[in-house]
Amino acid sequence: MSQIITKFPIDILYDIIEQVDDGASLFSCLLVNRSWCKITVRLWWKTIQNFNTLVACLPSESIATLRSNLVLVSTPTPKPLLFNYATFVKFLSFTDIKDKVRGLLLNQNVTASCARKLLTLEVLVMLLGQSTLKKLNANTKCIPSIEYTTYPRDCFRDLTEISCRSDICSDFLDQVSQLCQTIRSMDVKLELKVSDGIKKLISVQKNLKFFRIVFLHRESLEELIPSLTKHSSTLIKLEIDTFQITKSLLFLADFLNLQELVLQYYCDYLEDFKTLQHVTFPKLKSLKFKRGVPKYEYLINFLELNGKRLETLDIDCYGHNSLNLAIANFCQNLRSLSTIFMKEEGITLKSILVNCQNLQSVHLRSNDRYLDVSEIFEIVVKHSSKTFTELKLDFGIVSELSPKELDIFFSNWMNRVPRNPISFIIVIRYFGDITKENMKNVADGSGDDSEDEHLYVTFYRRTTRL
């Protein structure tokens, strides 16, 4: 068998090893033979693994420049490096490089800003000159002063993801625009200033699929909209994260090919949805609201038009029985749902579970304000579909949930026909009477060994405010 594996063509080996997603297994791949080692190192170093090793890859001219400016960098080993690791880097973050440089020089008691800038510049010139990037994080206002005309054409040729601010140097973004028009995913933090470079970078892309905007100033979004709407026919995922209510959301009506829409607002009752409630998005499969939601009347009208195509719906920041009833009536193809049921609304949860037969995952809240956990358990066991595989409960104070209640739930679940696996996830902010140890005891005591394989319990702390 080992001989067969070692005789695989290199390209097939690369595709196989590329699927390995944990460090221990990748390390094992390093030890198979020389061919496996070369492939594994190339994949491992898509992201920078050791900054000292990367610095050791600097060409002799760069080392001489650093030394002439009294910037002394040590190498991790006196022996020549086995690989030129810089050529393997595919994911580059300007901020990470700056932080690594600061940490390296601090360890050597070098604190001068000019030394940091010089080493940062030399490292970036090396990486941009030798690597072909796929992902770039330029989410910093101050881009190192590289001669923008010296970028090799290959450095941004395969770039598919970029994260940046709207106010960074236009010369840098102009260069990226000239060298790369195949970006599929953009993450832009809009500052008060929106440079011409960011507008151009967005406009010239030919296959933009995913776009995320974070902004604090309404005017900056309105300034970017003309560039973004050029991609209304190709964009399939759009995420908007802001602290402000903005009427600029009216432009969403042009994005009829959207499959996923995420709105993260810190303001309740998005009034701008008053217009969007009447817009049909024929391909929308996922709709998520974080922190703020439209008025439930607007959202009900929107779901009446678009709900039958939705597979994911997340509105767990607001609860209203009329809205949940609309979900039961209009969103019967859902696979994942996150919402809120107040007390006495168990019959509505039952309606959703009965009507939405494709539902696989439900995320609910439960405490003294919301639907009681025992009632949730009973309804889920009795009325969830054969496809149901995950229940997530969000608690304020978990002491209201006892190991006995969990034991009863697991036992009842195991008596269902057919007997399917379930993942039970507890989201909490404070530890009460439940601990990891007695959670484990509940799981271990829910049946014999043949049944334990059907139980998966995830337990973690949530520290953010609900």
Image (tube, rainbow, N blue to C red):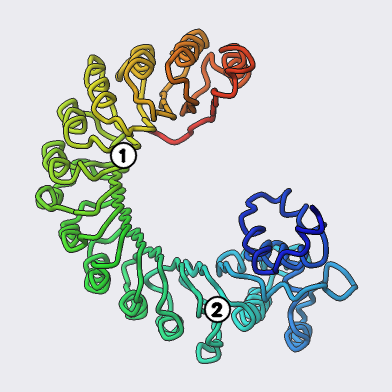
In this view of the protein, can residue 83 be seen by the observer?
yes
374 over 268 or under it: above or below: above
Q: Which of marks 2 and 1 is nearer the N terminus?
A: 2
Which percent across, then down, holds residue 298? Answer: 12, 42
**Residue that badge 2 annotates:** 144
Tell me the quadrant of the picture where the C terminus can be found: top left
**Residue that badge 1 annotates:** 314
100 over 299 or under it: above or below: below
Which of these two is toward me, 403 or 18?
A: 18
Name the residue at 18% across, 60% down. 248
For the residues labelled 2 and 1, the Cα–Cα distance comes to 41 Å
Q: What residue type is labelled 1?
A: Asp
Secondary structure under tag 2 reads loop
Secondary structure under tag 1 reads strand
Left or right: 403 as drawn, with respect to 242: right
Left or right: 94 as drawn, with respect to 426: right
Q: What residue type is labelled 2?
A: Pro
465 over 408 or under it: above or below: below
Extreme-bottom residue of the structure = 149
In this view of the protein, can residue 48 be seen by the observer?
no
Name the residue at 21% across, 67% down. 222
Which of these two is toward me, 86 or 327?
A: 327
